[in-house]
Image (cartoon, grey):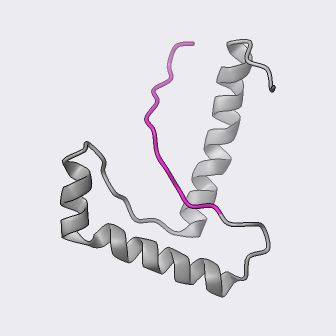
Amino acid sequence: MQDYAMSTWQCMLLLAGTPPAIVQALNAAVNKAAADSDLQKQFSAQGVQLQQSTPQQLETRLRADIPKWLKVARAAGVEPE
């Protein structure tokens, strides 16, 4: 399928209904780690770029990515197993 570019990325997902205070505390801890210059250098040496975000930014990205990749999978004839 043309007009698609892909890169890999990782995120932390929690169970639906996780209390907002826990979500915010984990997000703050992950963002603090991602901001650490020594950690950034270690990951950068492996070709990994650390980025900070909010739970809302992740939700926006997932809501945009899921339909896009569903379309690609269907066009390629990929079926759920």
Q: Residue furthest bottom?
A: 21
Residue 44 coordinates in the image, percent (x, y): 22, 50
The verdict on residue 10 being magenta is: yes
Magenta stretch, main secondary structure, is loop
The image quarter containing residue 34 is bottom left
The residue at the point 63 percent across, 49 percent down is 62
Residue range highlighted in magenta: 1-13
Say which of 75 and 45 sits in front.
45
Say which of 76 and 10 sits in front.
10
* Placement of the N terminus among the 4 image quadrants: top right
The image quarter containing residue 30 is bottom left
Say which of 14 and 73 sits in front.
14
Residue 77 coordinates in the image, percent (x, y): 74, 12
Q: In the visual, does 55 lie left or right of 15?
A: left
Query: Quick check: 5 above or below 26?
Result: above
Residue 73 coordinates in the image, percent (x, y): 69, 22
The verdict on residue 60 being magenta is: no
The residue at the point 25 percent across, 44 percent down is 46
The residue at the point 70 percent across, 25 percent down is 71
